[in-house]
Amino acid sequence: MSVSGPDANLYVCGITPYDATHLGHAFTYVSFDMLVRTWRDGGLNVNYAQNITDIDDPLFERAEATNVNWRDLADSQIELFRTDMETLNVIPPNNWVAVSDVIEPLVAEVKELLADGRAYGLTEDGRTDYYIKTSDADYAAPHLKDIDLISVFRENGGDPDRAGKQHPLDPIIWKGVVGDDFQAEGARPGAWRPGWHIECALIGRDYLGNTVDIQGGGADLVFPHQEMSLLHMADFHPEVTVRGQMNTGMVAYEGHKMSKSLGNLVLVSKLLQRGFEPMVVRLALLGHMWDSDWEYTDEDLDRAERRLTRWRRANHTGGAGAEELLATVRARLADNLDTPGALDAIDEWADANEYNDDRDGAGLFRDMCQALLGVSLS
């Protein structure tokens, strides 16, 4: 996760705004917040872009099932997500880009791909869906060799079995064109929409320039989403370089990964309504390595509450050794963003300072918690 500097460009896949924000979301975005804070502490200028997929089939389906206008549903969930992130002290991206705001550039890109012969259409019932052309060579990377690509693609909204596709893994770049109208009136919302993967490719290019230092998201996005976004970039943005990827672990509850389809979601807003402080929720998340899969229990929050109480007590009773602690915390974060190691180091320091009258380092300790960990002690 190192960069050549002095600038660091980060792209993180954002939410589809319904059922936001569960702990899986929060773990991802708090983890990337830690990357941003660590980069900034190292003197880097961070340019961070994140999309919001506010035009997508699952959103339309939820709106129809609940008899709510899809735009109202999207807007309410976007606002809830942003409020949850602010409450958890997550630094917002420099550019938070809704797909609905980049429709015209997406149409232009799709038309260019068609004009250059790099895409094709399949028509059914008077509506045309456009796909970008891919080949087996596009999916030959070593990190994909153990994945059943067809099955995973199918399970994540792909249509490998559609008749007429030139390659089963060709991703859709636009759905529901009528004649030359890319935004044709439909019987219901979602009759037309851009493809998911092309959205992130375009936003990454337009908001981060020619170098994306880290492309990130949850581990469940490695394929097809991130891989196909990279294919789009390579195909119609050959000047863009993606230097690395960072994918956060999955959070489970009741024996299964949190998912909207299963309904086993632990919402941040519900935890706050139960009386847990936002900093307790943040500490519970930081207690796990960013790339680990883990299962949530209330013990995570109980442990975080005890930790926060110790830190606050130490902040009021002493501050000896705060400079050494700062160096240790920085070293832990520099080592693969080891937040559990950083928290353990602070625990040891807090225990040693519980009855210490040396107040010289108290301010430094408080500022370190806020700036480096996003944990407010007030």
Image: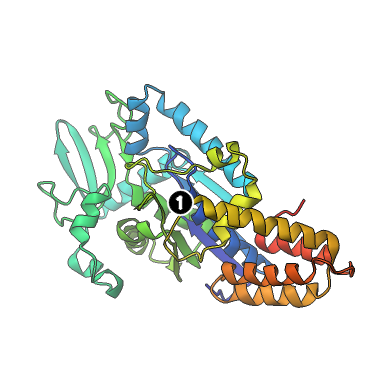
Badge 1 local density, few (<14 within 10 Å), some, or many (20+)? many
Quick check: can you spot residue 119?
no
Q: Is residue 8 above or below residue 25?
A: below
Instruction: Report the residue at 78% width, 58% height from top.
Output: 313
Q: Is residue 223 above or below residue 179?
A: below
Instruction: Report the residue at 24% width, 65% height from top.
Output: 147
Instruction: Report the residue at 69% width, 56% height from top.
Output: 308
Count of marks, rendered view: 1
Q: Secondary structure at mark 1?
A: helix
Residue of label 1: 24
Residue that sits furthest to the front in the current view? 355
Q: Is residue 62 above or below residue 301?
A: above
Residue 226 image-quadrant placement: bottom left
Where residue 153 sits: x, y (%)? 24, 54
User: Mark 1: which amino acid?
Assistant: Gly
Task: Give the left or right position of residue 289, taking residue 356 as reference.
Answer: left
Where residue 317 sits: x, y (%)? 85, 62
Residue 230 image-quadrant placement: bottom left
